[in-house]
Image (cartoon, helix red, strand yellow):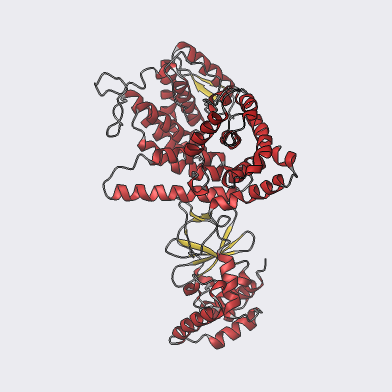
Amino acid sequence: MSDHALRLLREQRHLAELAAFPFNFDLARADHGEAVRLAAGGPLEAVAGDDTGGTYFVCEDGSVLYADSEGSAGIIGNSVDEALEVLVGLPGWHDYLGLAPADGEEKIRAAVAETEEEIREYRGIDDERTELRAGLGLPERSPVELIGLLHAALLRTEPDFLLLNAEEGGAHHLLDRHPRLPLWETVLARGRTDLTLLREGSAWDEVAGDRARRALALRAAQFDRREGDLPLLRHLLRHEAEASMTDELRLAAVLVGLHGCAEDLPLLYEVRETDFDTWCGLGGMPEPGADPAELRSWARDLDDSLFGTDPTDEPLFTWTGLAHEQGLVELARAALIRRLDDIDFRAYCDARDGKAMERRDASQLGSLVHEFEQLGDTFQALRAQRLYVPLQTRAWDRVSALLRLARLEREEGRFGAAIRTLASLRDTLAEPDGGAGAGGGSESGSGSGSDKSLGHWQRTNLGAYIVEEHYAVARTAATDTALADEVRAVTVAAGELLASLSGTARVNVERHLAGTTDTHTDIHTNSRTDIHTDTGANPDAGVSAEPTPPQPSAG
């Protein structure tokens, strides 16, 4: 990291003026105009701008990130010194974003010469370049070298320097269109290395004993199948069973089963009997003593429906989950944000054209919320949940989605929004048919069209979670004096909801609140009782509920 040139520009006005014109690195234009941040976190310092509205930011490691005024951004140097080498040596650098060293010296020099001739028609650059290089102590590099520096810097942009709109959370586009490795190839690289080790007969226990390495090795074996892999697949299968039911356990069982060896049936049966989850997840497996052809048929059916040999057919969430598991958090985050941005843009276009948002996005949005929460990125989870809520047509699902939305808003410190969301939730409880989308809602089976999915919510865990979240929002929002009236209203509503719960549910919620909250308004006396302050609504708490129909998770 070097900021030697930047210090000189700040100290010597003449050099700063040369950098500003003709090389468009102007210290006086360091205001980007909109709030931005890195998806990975970390500081950004705006140090200069140009006459098109673009801004140069210095990142924590010294890298220079350029963001234009059209929503694109990219790393252009590993340091301010390197970035200035590019800007001074290639004053038309915006026109070279598509060039790479592989294009060859002739093409690069021709492109640079053409652009610089055009620039010279309006302003001088040659004497100015010589003077600024000398003043800043920058080396003289050929256009080919400078294109190499720029190209290498651009390829570093994502995932570690993905720039977001700070308020809305959407990502900037990349400055360039250079090809990158697909996500799956980056994620699978470690697995391929370990699979090679396993095939060589080494590191069996090291790979099999590490959950992340084992999963990646199995995925590598999925896409590179060999007859001689059966012993190592058996070894990985035995160890994966220790993690209970996972996608990779099912994959390991399939890969073993595809070999069609009768002697593997006892092992597969033993794995299936590990626990209730594996018993369910590996259902339909032939029993010991079955014909090997039956085993092979079972494995082929699962392989065709769930796995296959093409990594591009795997869902995005397979690769982001594996990336997260091996510590490639920013790689996973960037891919998830890009997918959310795509859905968000489609939703915007649908709204602009007066169309309803496509319900096919609901499943992806639910997965995005979960994956972002796994990464600890509540901000992006909240973005996804806001898009998810309107897609719920059944009253139970709308209430569950609103409850999760309120929790995310609370955790992000958006207390006013959480209070409004809880109000919408109560409206849905009062009028289950009021928010149903087109074609949704009928749960009665009587043809009346009435949504009866919330008929017994007071006797379920969902009802308990609703009450607990009301108290959690009231407690945390109490720190904002501007929301005093709203907090009182939420507290009253919480008491009324608590009173409406069935006896068992209410007793358990009161016991939970007494042990985990700081202020609890009694519905009968309106008196406030002091209790702890460090815990909010907990969907995993041991809240009893009377027998009810099957129910989804409540946020």
Q: Residue furthest top?
A: 503
Q: Residue furthest left?
A: 448
Q: Residue at x 61, y 46 (%)?
A: 220
Q: Give the answer, above or below, for where 317 lies relative to 19.
A: above
- Where in the figure is residue 53, as x and y percent of width and height? 44, 68
- Where in the figure is residue 209, as x and y percent of width and height? 71, 37
Q: Residue at x 42, y 29 (%)?
A: 400
Q: Give the answer, above or below, for where 550 lies relative to 330.
A: above
Towards the viewer: 69 or 175: 175
Q: Residue at x 41, y 24 (%)?
A: 493
Q: Residue at x 33, y 23 (%)?
A: 430
Could you tell me which quadrant the N terminus lies in? Answer: bottom right
- Where in the figure is residue 18, as x and y percent of width and height? 55, 81
Residue 210 visible (yes or no): no
Residue 192 visible (yes or no): yes
Q: Give the answer, above or below, for where 377 lies relative to 261.
A: below
Q: Where is residue 77, by image quadrant? A: bottom right
Towards the viewer: 192 or 474: 192
Q: 264 left or right of 319?
A: right
